[in-house]
Image (cartoon, rainbow, N blue to C red):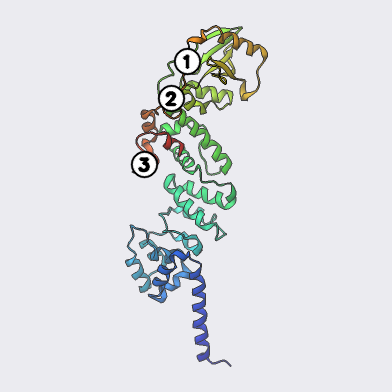
Amino acid sequence: MTSNLLLAPRQGAGRFDLLERRLRRYHPRFQGAIRALVARHPRIADLAASFPALLFALAVPQARLDPARAIACVIDGATLAQVAALADLPLWLRKLPPEAFVRPIPRLPQGELFRRQIANHLPRSPKLAPTWLQLVAGVAELAHEPMAAWIARELVRESQRVRTARLRMICLWAWFSSEPATLGHDLIEKPWTPDMRIDAVRSAAEDWRAVVALHINLGRLPIADMWLRPGRMAGYEFVPLDSIAAITDEAKVMRNCLNTYGQNLMHNRSRVWSVRKDGDRVATLRIARRYRDPLPNIVELKGPGNVEVSHELWWAARQWLHKHDLSQIDMAERRWGTMPLDRGSWVSLWRPYWLAKRRIPDRLPMTPSREALDAL
């Protein structure tokens, strides 16, 4: 039989090799700090196997956290739950691999419902884990815990379809979806629900952003100069779309992208009209300059869902247009990006979010700007 005296060194060497393999899985930038902490006590080293996230959090703490007390509790033999509470670390992080931690661990959701949900959406791939963790933390901060559980699920389910470019805007839309007494909620056509898939979420949030931009561009007052006068021609009625309500109603009924024209309208690039017959909407008309022609032209005339309209309607629209003295219309275009946004609409829209989050984010400032609007 092999002597126990010979087995002991081999077992010790085996444990050391296993610990070394675990430590090597942490990001190289933080291995020095982690190894220095592990060297302080065997119980701290055991965290590499039992709770990799906790070991990382104690070695690379957040600026707001002093890990000294938590470290002392580890050495004294406190439970993982006790130490994690001192480190402000949720226990559901126990199952994440060392590869997940590439920067100090941000504040993460710890609600009971979230803990139950997140167990089903943990990343299986160590390569995906860092992105997954940062997205969960970011979405929880920007929106709320249910949305954080949703992004965790979607990233695991279809990581290639989750893009971060519009994540801030999606989070704002999701947050306002659950805040019915706000202007932001009033502008939502389709609110967020946890069962939505990523493509549906992106589409609904983009629709909301278009209406938000329309409000912030146009403000509460109607467009004073519509270039042309309302009127009738050959049984068709030409009605000005000169306000937010008129434009959004037309876009909804006619199933078109009229909501995206806020900036275009404010820079005097075009005007939009509703064409109706017997009280029913039959077409949406856009007047603008065409090529080098300095006079107003019909540049778009489309029926519901952007279908083509009849020759009869085109002829009626031409006749109505040419009833006006086109040479007297001020079509001077404003330089793109120079027209100010409506501050009242901006503040009314975002104030509930600022108050709920107890801060005014740098990318959602008190003073409106086109840079901030574009960054959503």
3D distance between C-alphas at marks 2 and 1 = 13 Å
Residue 316 on image: x %, y %: 61, 10
* Coordinates of residue 127 in the picture (x, y in percent): 55, 59
Q: Are marks 2 and 1 in contact (CB under 8 Å)?
A: no
Please report contact status of discs 2 and 3: CB closer than 8 Å, yes or no: no
Q: Position of 162 compared to 32: left or right?
A: right
Q: Residue 253: give x, y in percent of width and height.
A: 57, 23
User: Looking at this view, is 162 or 245 the one in front?
Assistant: 162
Compared across the picture, whether 207 is left or right of 373 comes to right
Instruction: Look at 44% across and 53% down and name the residue there.
Output: 112
Q: Quadrant of the N terminus?
A: bottom right
Whether residue 113 is visible? no
Q: What residue lies at 34% left-to-right and 70% top-to-bottom?
A: 72
> Disc 1 on helix, strand or loop?
loop
Given this view, does label 2 or label 3 mark the residue nearer the observer? Answer: 2
Residue 150 lies left or right of residue 66; in this view the side is right
Residue found at the very far right of the displayed protein:
311
Q: Earlier in the sequence, mark 2 or mark 1?
A: 2
Residue drawn at x 40%, y 23% is 220
Give the secondary structure at mark 2. helix
> Which of the numbered marks, if any, corresponds to residue 226?
1
Residue 356 bears which disc, if any?
A: 3
Q: What separation in Å lies between label 1 and label 3 (alpha carbons)?
A: 39 Å
The residue wearing badge 2 is: 218
Q: Nearer the viewer, mark 1 or mark 3?
A: 1
Rendered view: 101 above or below 186 = below
Q: Residues within 10 Å of mark 1 (few under 14, many from 20)?
A: many
Q: Secondary structure at mark 3?
A: helix
